[in-house]
Image (cartoon, rainbow, N blue to C red):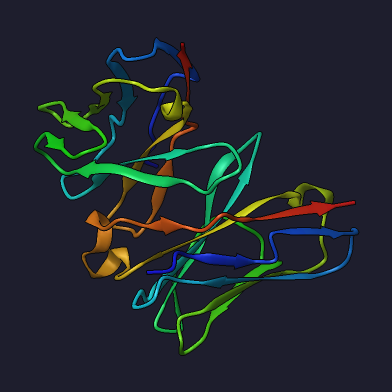
Amino acid sequence: KAGVTQTPRYLIKTRGQQVTLSCSPISGHRSVSWYQQTPGQGLQFLFEYFSETQRNKGNFPGRFSGRQFSNSRSEMNVSTLELGDSALYLCASSFTPRASGGAGETQYFGPGTRLLVL
Amino acid sequence: DAKTTQPNSMESNEEEPVHLPCNHSTISGTDYIHWYRQLPSQGPEYVIHGLTSNVNNRMASLAIAEDRKSSTLILHRATLRDAAVYYCILRINRDDKIIFGKGTRLHILP
């Protein structure tokens, strides 16, 4: 079974631009979560989608948004990029979301998209 | 907010057991404890998880304190490939949050 895939793997943008990152979950998985990883803050939860609905959101500004498609693939968008948005963006998939009893379920992470904002 | 606390780094000799501690004093009864590890240039990888009882799998063991306010990940025989950042994670049922610790960077000495 193929793992979680993320595209692109690397991205360079300038301040003020916007960016869209893509995540394809493991086949059959319907829950997709996004995380931001930086050296200073570590891994921080962005949001989770299940069946095309956002189920939970972390403490990030509205510039960070996402969506999920009917095939469970997910995208996240960051508008008006700032230098501090430079980070590794990770996507993880699981079969069920936590609110449906999935708190004991394993999440499978992709390799991440490394975004550099200049 | 519930949070986890881990040492920043630890060292261990190859082929010896490693005990990685995690404090989660504000854990609630339905919160699961997960451990993931992240090797360089890779996404986090699942290691083990538990709720109340100690757990074993082919990668590691998880020892959970009786009051559940702390847990310890045990690698029985560390190899160089176990060098990674280990994250202790709470999966909170009541408000759907995921709380990451800062992680422990484990160095394995040959």
- Residue that appears at 28% across and 29% down: B25
Q: B88 or B108, which is in the foreground?
A: B108
- The N terminus of chain B is located in which quarter? top left
Q: Is residue B85 left or right of residue B31?
A: right
- Residue that appears at 45% across and 69% down: A32
- Residue that appears at 20% across and 32% down: B62
- Count the marks: 0
Q: Is residue B44 left or right of residue A87?
A: left
Residue B65 image point, x, y percent: 15, 26
Residue B46 image point, x, y percent: 35, 47
Residue B96 against residue B87 in the figure, above or below: below
Q: B96 or A68, which is in the foreground?
A: A68
- Residue at the far bottom in the pictured view: A70
- Residue that appears at 32% across and 21% down: B21
Q: Is residue A28 left or right of residue A85?
A: left
Residue A94 against residue A59 in the figure, above or below: below
Residue B28 image point, x, y percent: 21, 43
Residue A63 against residue B1 in the figure, above or below: below
Q: Residue A64's image quarter?
A: bottom right
Residue B98 image point, x, y percent: 40, 51
